Amino acid sequence: MQRILVVEDSSLVQSIVKVALRRYGSVHIASASNGVEALAAIARDGEPDLMLVDINMPRMSGIELLDELRGQGVVPRIPVIIVSTESDDHDVQRGLDAGARAYLKKPFRTEDLVPLMREILGR
């Protein structure tokens, strides 16, 4: 069973993403409301198979989280999809430069998430 960590401060978006992820198949879904909680979850539970990360979050942004994980050598081992309202070309490039494999702009269609996950995870 693959493990997915959803790092998102909006409980509504977390719920939408979890519904979409259940369409993917047999996965364990964990969530964190910010980068600090995500780091704690990884330290406690080990590296997930995939992370979905928002950019704008309290305490530690998605970019700061990716920078920290890259410094620890965790990114690029963990594939990351950024899911964010930040949608200009500069923001997308910042996310990709920070180590994300893909960038999904909010609002997104749940039908777009599952094929992207399959492509990244090779299923």
Image (spheres, rainbow, N blue to C red):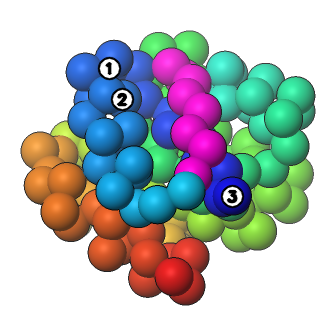
Total marks placed:
3
Identify the residue under disc 3. Answer: 1
Image quadrant of residue 103? bottom left
Q: CA distance from mark 2 to mark 3?
A: 20 Å
Asked which secondary structure carries label 3, the reply is loop
Circle 2 sits in a helix, a strand or a loop, which is it?
Answer: helix
Can residue 3 be found in the magenta stretch?
Answer: no
Which class describes the residues within 10 Å of circle 1: few (<14), some (14-19), or many (20+)? few
Q: Which mark is residue 14?
A: 2
- Compare marks 1 and 3 and give the one earlier in the sequence: 3
Q: Quarter-wise, where is residue 118 in the image?
A: bottom left
- In the image shown, does 28 or 58 lie closer to the viewer? 28
Q: Nearer the viewer, mark 1 or mark 3?
A: 3
What x and y, as percent, mark residue 97?
52, 67
What residue is rendered at 30% in x and 49% in y? 20
Tags 1 and 2 in contact by the CB under 8 Å rule? yes
**Is residue 41 shown left or right of residue 30?**
right
Say what amino acid the circle numbered 2 marks. Answer: Gln
Q: Position of residue 6 (x, y in %)?
A: 50, 38
Q: Is residue 28 visible?
A: yes
Is 22 on the left or on the right of 26, as rendered? left
Spot occupied by residue 82 in the image (x, y as percentages of width and height): 41, 53
Amino acid on which disc 1 is placed: Ser
Camera-nearest label, 1 or 2: 2
The structure residue drawn at horizontal position 55% and vertical position 85%, both measured from the top left corner, is 122
Disc assigned to residue 10: 1
Relative height, residue 106 to residue 96 (above, below): above
